[in-house]
Amino acid sequence: MGLPGRAANGVLLVIALSVCAPRAWTQDYPTKPIRLIVPQAVGSGGDLRARQIGQKLAEALGQPVIVDNLPGANSAIGARQAAKAAPDGYTLCSCIINNALNDLLSPDPASRLNHELIPVTRLTGGPLIMVVHPSVPATTLPAFLDLAKSKPGLFTYASTGKGSITQLLGEMIKQRGAVNLVEVPYKSTAAEIPDILTGRLTVAFDFYSVIGQRIKDGSLRALAVANTTRLAVLPDTPTMIESGLPGVVATAWNGICVPAGTPDSVIAVLHRGLVKALNDPTTREQIVSTGAEIGGESPEEFAAFIRSEIGKWGKVIKEVGIDLK
């Protein structure tokens, strides 16, 4: 038996509204400022990149993007806050490699990547550069390793805490270079800069965007790049592989994630806005000039990339014996 005319029209209206709802949401979003949580300190590599892209994203979406720095706990504090936010597209998280490492070493059921935080796209990636204070009498990585072997326990290296990529790199160098370096943990990337500039700290691992000018002006000396190839911005600085440490590669990345449950239509708007921001000629030139590569992959591709990174670093963690328990 068919429905009465008024009832049938009501059903058709409900169906029409349900079909159009995602499109309507997309057309309405965004209507207010967007909060971008950065789980690193102001001035760090991830912070600088997030602010750069955030400004361009604001232009693309027509709404302000407000950066909120929440550093600490190897970037876990900011991730937890982002994951607890309403899944409406108005809270973003600048997810970084440290968040993937946290998922390996101390998984937080409240803020796991690809679970409570889902990917939108990767922004950039770049290798860590090993630098020392100019007072260190070594101009190459092999020379530094020889020096460290002759004075075990005298030299220090900066990390951003247990399970961070800087600690993993430091421990890989210790193991494969057969040297004894003392780890000095800092709250965030770039927090160690004042200490290494004064010589209180021996070694730091950081990004060209943070320490490039210091290398150029001679305040710091670059010994090696943790990459498979040399950087165009540092053509005379060899890779760690070239310097006798095979397989020592540490490339950090950052991207944008949102709380699980965020509508696909909103994620699509964010992805388009971020790709537009990354394709801005000035932005692209600036990213490349700082020794980084440009992302922009689809949410599905970024999710697959995160899984591959967790697999890769899981093997390294077992190799160097890091355990947070």
Image: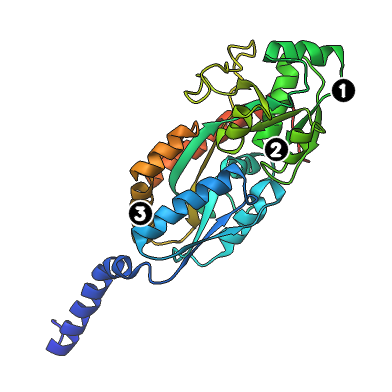
Residue with the mark numbered 2? 163
Amino acid type of the residue that numbered disc 1 sits on in the rendered structure = Gly
The residue positioned 27% from the left and 66% from the top of the image is: 23
The residue positioned 37% from the left and 51% from the top of the image is: 271
Q: Is residue 111 left or right of residue 4?
A: right
* 87 lies above or below 108: below
Q: The N terminus lies in which quarter of the figure?
A: bottom left
Q: Looking at the picture, tell me which residue is in the foreground, 271 or 110.
A: 271
CA–CA distance in space, label 1 to label 2: 21 Å
Residue 27 position, x and y percent, is 29, 68
The reply to whether residue 316 is in sight is yes
Mark 2, residues whose alpha carbon is within 10 Å: few (<14), some, or many (≥20)? Answer: many
Which disc number belongs to residue 273? 3
Q: How is the image coloured?
A: rainbow
CA–CA distance in space, label 3 to label 2: 32 Å
**Element carrying mark 3:** helix
1 or 2: mark nearer the eye = 1
Residue 165 position, x and y percent, is 65, 34
The reply to whether residue 318 is in sight is no
Residue 175 position, x and y percent, is 74, 19
**On the image, which quarter does residue 324 sit in?**
top right
Amino acid type of the residue that numbered disc 3 sits on in the rendered structure = Gly
Mark 3 and 1 residues: CB-CB less than 8 Å, in contact? no
Residue 148 position, x and y percent, is 81, 16
**On the image, which quarter does residue 190 sit in?**
top right
Residue with the mark numbered 1? 153
Mark 1, residues whose alpha carbon is within 10 Å: few (<14), some, or many (≥20)? Answer: few
